[in-house]
Amino acid sequence: MKIIETATWRIMQENHDEFAEIAIHGPNGDDATGLAWQAAHPEAIYYSKTRNFCRKIEGTNEEEWIFIDEYDSLDDYEKSHETLYSDPAYEEMKREGYKHTMSLMVPGSNPEHLVWEEVPGTNMEFKEHKLTHWS
């Protein structure tokens, strides 16, 4: 059964590019954190896919961001949290990165991580406008 982990938060639209750069290259722009670090360390990654999306919040100058990490199984999700997230070096790196991203978040944003389980029988995949998989 697939598992996804999500978190959402808000930032000012004027900070969009800066926030995206931090997410990709880390707060110092040196690829020591963020997605660039993850791409360079596949041995430390247990999710099968990660994505970030954003949307403008109508009537404001804010946008909402969400990340979605997808795991092939509950075991992969648990392994991720038992190994990667308990590594002191990774924890320090994450803490430093969060200082910068949190400073860009709109007050009241709470990027709480939520974990979701796929409902069996409800997954369909289309490639080139053809159904290729139905769970």
Image: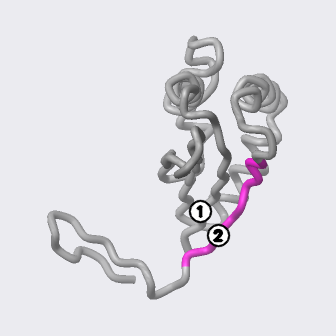
Do the residues under discs 1 and 2 have CB atoms within 8 angstroms?
yes
Segment colored magenta: 110-118
Relative to 93, is 49 on the left or the right? left
- Asked if residue 113 lies in the magenta stretch, the reply is yes
Circle number at residue 45? none
Quadrant of the frame with the N terminus: bottom right
Amino acid beneath label 1: Ile
Q: Nearer the viewer, residue 77 or 9?
A: 9
Q: Which mark is residue 116?
A: 2
Task: Classify residue 124 as left or right of residue 49.
Answer: left
* Colour setting: one colour
Q: Is residue 17 magenta?
A: no
The answer to whether residue 79 shows anywhere in this view is yes
Density class for disc 1 (Cα within 10 Å; few <14, some 14-19, many ≥20) is many
In the image as oriented, which residue stretches furthest toward the front?
Answer: 59
Mark 2: few/some/many CA within 10 Å (<14, 14-19, 20+): few
Q: Earlier in the sequence, mark 1 or mark 2?
A: 1
Helix, strand or loop at disc 1?
strand
- Residue at (77% x, 42% y) in the render: 85
Q: Which quarter of the figure has residue 97?
A: top right
Callout 2: helix, strand or loop? strand
Residue 3 percent location from the top left of the image: 60, 66
Foreground of the two, 76 or 9: 9
Three-letter amino acid code at disc 2?
Answer: Trp
Say left or right for 48 vs 91: left
Tell me the distance, in whole angstroms, between the alpha carbons under discs 1 and 2: 5 Å
- Is the C terminus in the top left, top right, bottom left or bottom right quadrant? bottom left
Check disc 1 and report the residue beneath it: 4
